[in-house]
Image (tube, helix red, strand yellow):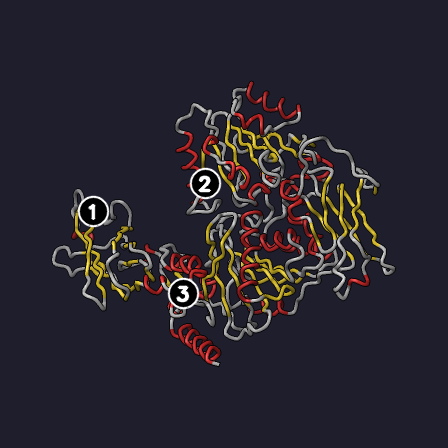
Amino acid sequence: MKRFGMLVFVGMFARMAIAEIPVYQEVPPLQRLTHMRVRGPRRLAASTARFLVELPRVPYPLENLSEEGETEVTARLQLRHLSADFEISKEVSLRFLPTGQLTGGVGQSLEFDLADWPDGDVEARFRLPALSGESDLHAPPIQFRIVREAVGAVAENHRAEMDAWIEEANRLTLIWGKRALWPTLDTALTQPESPWEGLRGFLLRAYPNPQLERMQPYTLYVPEALDLSEPAPLMILLHGSGGDYRNLVADYAAGQRFEEHPMLIANAGAFPNLEFRHLALNNVRWIIEDVSEKYGVDPDRIYVQGISLGGRGTLDLAALLPDLFAAVSSQGAYGIHRTLMDPLSPAHMDPVAYQLAARNDIRTWMPNLATTPVEMVFGWSDTSTRPVGALAIASVLETLGYRVVERGFDLGHNLTLPEYDWASTREWFLGQRKQRWPRQLQFRVANLRHNRFAWIRVDALHDYTGVGEVKARILPDKTLQVETRNVARLTYLPPPMMHEIAESFPGGLRVFHFDRENRPVETPPEVGDGPRKHPGQSGPLWNFYSDPILIVWDDSSADEDLRARLQGWATQAARSGATPGPVDFPIKAASEVTPREQRERNLYFITFPHSEHPWREAVPSPLPAQAKEVRQKVAEEGQSTSLFALRPSPWAEDRLVLVAEGETHLPAIPHLYFFQEHLQPDWMILRGRTPIAAGGYNHDWSPGPMTTENFITRILTR
């Protein structure tokens, strides 16, 4: 009884805190400021406090500045402990041009060592001295709290996640002009054995990401009205390009409310500018597992909603993981390719180029949504992702006989209140439950990593540049009827015997083999000696980014500056949101790679033509004769090419090596950014950024079909 009473008290405390304390801070754009502002930590668990002081464009009247040269002034940032006799300050020299502009930018970063300061509240004040008799300029004071003792008392099994929360609270970067305040953090620190117990509202949670080898944060909203004594519905929110896992707080600031139609809402977003496949798909999947473990989630009521980049992401996730979501809501989605809108495209395009292009067109994967209702939301005035794309997607779903809802608003790309309120989508979500054992289905697959739908699993394809397709249904007499296209091996997985629907399905696991004419055969087709493609190693190129990654450079190169340039490239990629910034993919010379890293990581091997490094023989990248001729012809014209080839790792059965070979320039990650058509083949040759040859590897990793046509098409809705 005492424990129950304490939980009730803690929950009441958390609710009062949410009601009285804002959950975000509005931070106006600097160019509109007439006053200075200071940004610093909210809760300090380290010994160093970092501050960012930002000044208005012209802090002084121009007549007070020197008409020639620069005006130098000395400003001061002062910290004062509010309950102890501690005070410290730092001076910073500022120089202003006659135009009023501050040389070196409008922001000044200052750090203080507070290792000797006790826990408690600290006030920070910034003063800019007056010029010509004017009054001193002051930034509004800010307060932060030193919480080292409280954080140190947190139970060890919660410490890593609490550290992630503290780190996020101290971030100086904003999300859409908003800064999350995390008002329940102080409450969590008062209950160190179970910090999150009883907390409601906006929480920052985190899980250990095995691919990035770090704690990965996400925002979670736990409604007051949600009964957590039973499995709860869960909605995953996907951000648009440039967003991250804090978008939910910015949406709340824009007027969205989450108490009506209560459900757990988790905001994914480890990568601001990646489509939701490989790295970002893993993040979503692991967040669902983490929330399910910590709160209890109804597996038949998991939903996903996203806008723009996230709008396409909802459809990608539902197609790649067709057993996961009960319903999806896609806002401002893109993914229809202009070239493929022409019904005669298959007739006038090279077949392999058409297949590679179609693999990145969202309509190819619509059949996988047979058991997932879709809501297509769009703005009639949207000029970024035009409504024609959403209408085309809805049309395909309707033609297939699937459940789709169209909702158009007289708005632009960023749908806002009051015309569009998420509550209506959440109400629609709660009316949907996952249909896990349909009696008929249609399933398409190109990457065997995502090769299962309900009771069908595709184990091998004939042509890995194309798409495998299965149409299967259970007849009333429990007969299994199957049609395939480009499928070499297929497994039927019956429902568990204890499941109520099991009696209406054929019993027993069954394996089927098909020849290239899609006819069933008794024995599997023969393949050559050596490694075989399987779910972790099936391709295409983007499959490489689904496991832990190590960038390796060929240290037989005479280029002494290669490591520095690689590090600079990786840092730039991280800033673009393409890699897991602020921590980049790790980089090593091949001679520094350990046997354990060879076993556990996908290796991005950057090398050069005619290299004699031992890895070149261990990881060959065979190409069709025609591809070699294309590359040789370009070389004879005095131009350079780069090669990207996916290969099975010789050091681990479930890992890959991506061979990146460049002649005169540094091969970069092949367009690991927004639109990833470049990642659809198993190998490709680029001249600059343009593919001039591409293709796939067969089941035994020998060269398969290829094309010399450009398979990159223009997205219709942009």
Q: Going 52% across and 49% down the picture, which residue do you hit?
A: 210
Residue pointed to by mark 3? 182
Query: Residue 394, percent across and down?
Result: 67, 56
The Cα atoms of the two marked residues, 3 and 2, are separated by 31 Å
Q: Which mark is residue 586?
A: 2
Dividing the picture into quarters, in which one does residue 476 lie? bottom right
Q: Is residue 404 shown left or right of residue 217? A: right
Residue type at mark 3: give it. Answer: Trp
| Farthest residue, direction left | 133
| Farthest residue, direction right | 477
Q: Going 20% across and 47% down the picture, which residue do you hit?
A: 95
Residue pointed to by mark 1? 95
Are the two marked residues, 3 and 1, in contact with CB atoms closer than 8 angstroms? no
Residue type at mark 1: give it. Answer: Arg
Label 1: which secondary element: strand
Q: Nearer the viewer, residue 656 or 404?
A: 656
Q: Going 59% across and 58% down the picture, which residue do you hit?
A: 330
Residue 538 seen in the figure: yes
Mark 3 against mark 2, which lies toward the viewer? 2
Relative to 690, is 191 above or below? below
